[in-house]
Image (cartoon, rainbow, N blue to C red):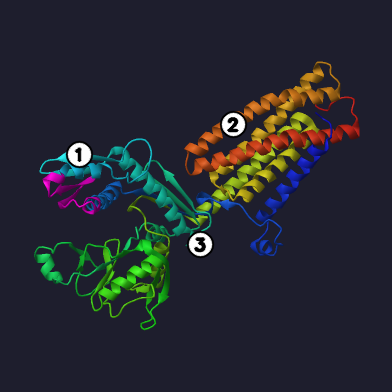
Amino acid sequence: MLILSRWKVSVVIAATIFGILFTLPNLLPQSWRDALPPFMPSKTLNLGLDLQGGSYLMLEVDTPALVRERSEALMEDVVKTLEDAGVRVANPAVRQGGASVQIADPTKYDQAFRLVSRMPQPVRSGQGNDLSVSRADGGRISVAFTDRGIQELTMAAVEQSVEIIRKRVDELGTKEPSITRQGANRIVVQVPGESDPERLKAVIGKTAKLSFQMVDQSRTYAEAISGVLPPGAEILPYEAGANAFEPGVLVRRRVEISGENLADARMSNDPQTGQPVVSIRFDGQGAKRFGEITTRNVNKPFAIVLDGKVLSAPNINEPILGGSAQISGGFTAESANNLAIMLRNGALPAPLTVEEQRTVGAELGADAVEAGRISTMVAFVTILVFMVLAYGLLFGGISVVALLINGLMIIAAMSFTQATLTLPGIAGLILTLAVAVDANVLIYERMRDEVRAGRAPLSAMEAGFSRAMETIIDANLTTLIAAAIMFFFGAGPVRGFAWTLSIGVFTSVLTAVLVTQVLLAVWYRTARPKTLPIA
């Protein structure tokens, strides 16, 4: 065990160099890090929300609104499926959790039922059905989402929302946000360094579903609100400040073109008024569709709708064939930029409601960093004093050196992986120091037992390492299993604690065993002692 093999010495040297190089940037000011050569590591530890300060939001997917919207899409799919097969339908209706249609020709009722029953599952493939199809009175066919279908809808919406929110937050220039799913339909957003949660909500809370719909000119707004709406039309309100004359506008329900066809969206200024606007550019299919619509509807108003509110309803003066357009609506520079970010990264699949909101001040975060630094120093000094008193300056000092290398490797590994250090993570770091020393205690106590049994110093040292290894591996393996459970099933600070602890388990085994072994082997080959100082 105490043979100074090349691979052991190489591993110890490599681990020490890795720890120093990747820990060093954390000790240098920003100007020095910027001046480092390209081949030198420059990544630093990312401080979590509780250490740096920032904003915390817990969002919940509005499941009823999601199901209602998907039910409307389901009704359109059913109608299209039947009409494409030559089956005429009447009185299509949307109900909570599904839709129903009436078959105009009773002789085609069975055919229609078979066609609807064979419709592809709208959510995912897998065990069970997402839809249930049933016959209803009056020659109607009902289609409804099953409980499994609603569950799959919600899961898919949460997963998609997490990715869209991540893209939106990244474009704010925020460093290392934490966006995680919690439970069945909740999302936790932690953004270190962002002190304004209202700005966050303005960017990530909006669904940002953009659509272009023709204005219905068969009736005025006043006639529409006082009478029966024309078939296929609806009244949508104007966005606040978008129109000073009327609170809403009558538009056709049919979406001529949606935000799904956008290729880009940027904030710019109107060349005539100088006001902030959002310049959008469609993809190939969207540009073709936009050109066809504007060509057919010259001198007709066109409503630009965002999340059910009309931003503007400009008149189409001439065909727009370039695939580009502008959205105006009384924007400020910030609101126009936020809208561009949302449109550029896609619409959320469902509305999100804010269930919890917190702001951690920078001063509180600085206090937490200072408390963590002091607690770590106190823990280290206490361990140092204990090891020196218990095992002497030589063996205790070697354990402290291994502990220092262990600390360097933990910080280096977290900097290299860009893991986020939280206050519970500091607790995990302190616990790791204790676990690392525990391995040395096991080795040294086994050496003492072997010396008392009459073994020579070299034999006692070798037995100390070999016979303590099983206990060390068992102890660290159970710790690693516990950390893995906390990481995969926990959230937020719990995962930060588990990640730091997991890194510490690997580094502590390496340093407490291998580094200690190499240093003791060097001492033994140099001193050739007759007795062990710890005996």
Q: Position of residue 172 (x, y in %)?
A: 47, 62
Residue positioned 44% across, 52% down in the render:
163
Between the C-alphas of marks 3 and 2, the distance is 37 Å
In the displayed structure, does residue 45 sit left or right of residue 184? Answer: right
In the displayed structure, does residue 378 sit left or right of residue 194? Answer: right
Q: Residues within 10 Å of mark 3 (few under 14, many from 20)?
A: few
Assess whether residue 82 is covered by the magenta stretch: yes
Q: Position of residue 234 (x, y in %)?
A: 18, 63
Q: Which mark is first along the chain, 2 or 1?
A: 1
Kind of residue indicated by mark 1: Ser
Range of the magenta residues? 80-108
- Residue 303 lies, with reference to residue 355, above or below; the image says below
Q: Residues within 10 Å of mark 1 (few under 14, many from 20)?
A: some
Q: Are dots 1 and 2 in contact, CB under 8 Å?
A: no
- Residue 3 lies, with reference to residue 51, above or below; the image says above
Kind of residue indicated by mark 3: Gly
Helix, strand or loop status at disc 2: helix
Q: Nearer the viewer, residue 151 or 168?
A: 151
Residue positioned 66% across, 60% down in the render:
29
Q: Position of residue 17 (x, y in %)?
A: 75, 48
- The label shown at residue 173 is 3
| Residue that extends furthest to the top in the rendered view of this protein | 453
Residue 146: image quadrant is: top left
Kind of residue indicated by mark 2: Thr
Q: Are dots 3 and 1 in contact, CB under 8 Å?
A: no
Between the C-alphas of marks 1 and 2, the distance is 54 Å
Residue that mark 2 sits on: 479
Helix, strand or loop status at disc 1: strand
- Residue 318 lies, with reference to residue 183, above or below; the image says below
Between the C-alphas of marks 3 and 1, the distance is 51 Å
Residue that mark 1 sits on: 134
Task: Tell which tag, 3 or 1, sits nearer the viewer.
Answer: 1
